[in-house]
Amino acid sequence: MQPLLRVERLYKTFRKSKEQVYALKEISLQIARGECLGVVGESGSGKSTLGKVILALERPDSGEVWLDDVPLLQLKGAALREQRQHVQVVFQDPNASLNSKMPIWRSIMEPLDNFPDVMPPFLSGKRTDRIGLAAQLLELVGLPLDHLARYPHELSGGQRQRVAIARGISLNPKLLVCDEPTSSLDVSVQAQILQLLKSLKQTLGMSYLFISHDIASVQYMSDRMIVMKDGEMIDEFASSELTHQDRHIYTKLLVEAAS
Ligand SMILES: Nc1ncnc2c1ncn2[C@@H]1O[C@H](COP(=O)(O)OP(=O)(O)OP(=O)(O)O)[C@@H](O)[C@H]1O
């Protein structure tokens, strides 16, 4: 079966003082339908840049990204906008995706307001008015309905991240990019958010690109993992084989540092 996402030979460099830094160096990978691919690596290894290129938020120097055989980097204008609904994101900081002046229900509805023709199959409840749809989304991420009328500052960090997840899934994307989605949260809340993301993946059948520096979270979430270092992909394996003998020496060091 054709993979959902194909990334081929991505290169991206940045200028840092007078030096050229590789954020991505010959990155090729695939994600199958319903699969979670985990990306782990130290700070500066290129994880976020990879996510941004796949989200078409950053242009690589060269390479291509195909989503269901559509070459995303070739698209412009309306065609690119159309494809954006299929790849959504949950960032580390939920405040970045929530407008402090908007009640929660309006933030949740923003993506659906931008794509009025989209009606995800899982929003099949009787209430299809905007508040009704927002209520269904809020329920899916495990928040009580009285949160609809609240404002971001009235919610905890974990609750705000649940709202950001509700936005992320609202268009029924084919791929959800999760970039350090739990890094800003308390440890006890981190586990709950990971559980929520895992169960949503199961119920909604989405694929994930799950980015984190925390190797244990990545293993918990992912079917397969890649390890990045200085913009290069230096290891790739089934998550169940993280501690196998034949792992790259650098992967072993990351495992050791985390234990
Ligand atoms: N907009 C930018 N301008 C200049 N350099 C950048 C820019 N974005 C990323 N870089 C550089 O590219 C490299 C990869 O950065 P990237 O943010 O992708 O790594 P990362 O693994 O996500 O790190 P972190 O976990 O700290 O976010 C780093 O050397 C970084 O400094």
Image (cartoon, grey):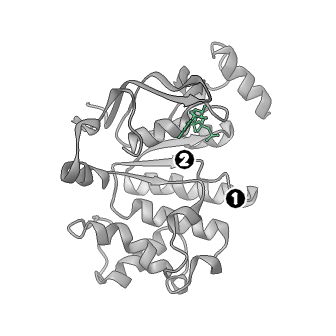
* Residue nearest the observer in this picture, 120 or 180: 180
Give the amino acid at mark 1: Leu
Query: Which percent across, then down, holds residue 214?
Result: 68, 40
Where is 122 relative to 28, above or below?
A: below
The mark found on residue 100 in the picture is none
Q: According to the image, label 2 marks what residue?
A: 179
Contact, CB < 8 Å: mark 1 with mark 2?
A: no
Looking at the rendered structure, the secondary structure element under dot 1 is loop
Query: Which percent across, then down, holds residue 67?
Result: 28, 39
Where is 7 relative to 191, above or below?
A: above
Density class for disc 2 (Cα within 10 Å; few <14, some 14-19, many ≥20) is many
Quadrant of the rendering where the C terminus is positioned = top right
Q: According to the image, label 1 marks what residue?
A: 185
* Residue nearest the observer in this picture, 259 or 240: 259
Give the amino acid at mark 2: Asp
**Image mark count:** 2
Q: Is residue 123 visible?
A: no
Residue at the spot 47% in from the left edge and 35% down from the top edge: 50
Using residue 195 as the reference point, say whether residue 175 is left or right of it.
left
Using residue 1 as the reference point, say whether residue 212 is left or right of it.
right
Residue furthest out toward the front? 18
Question: Which quarter of the rendered image does ligand 1 occupy?
Answer: top right
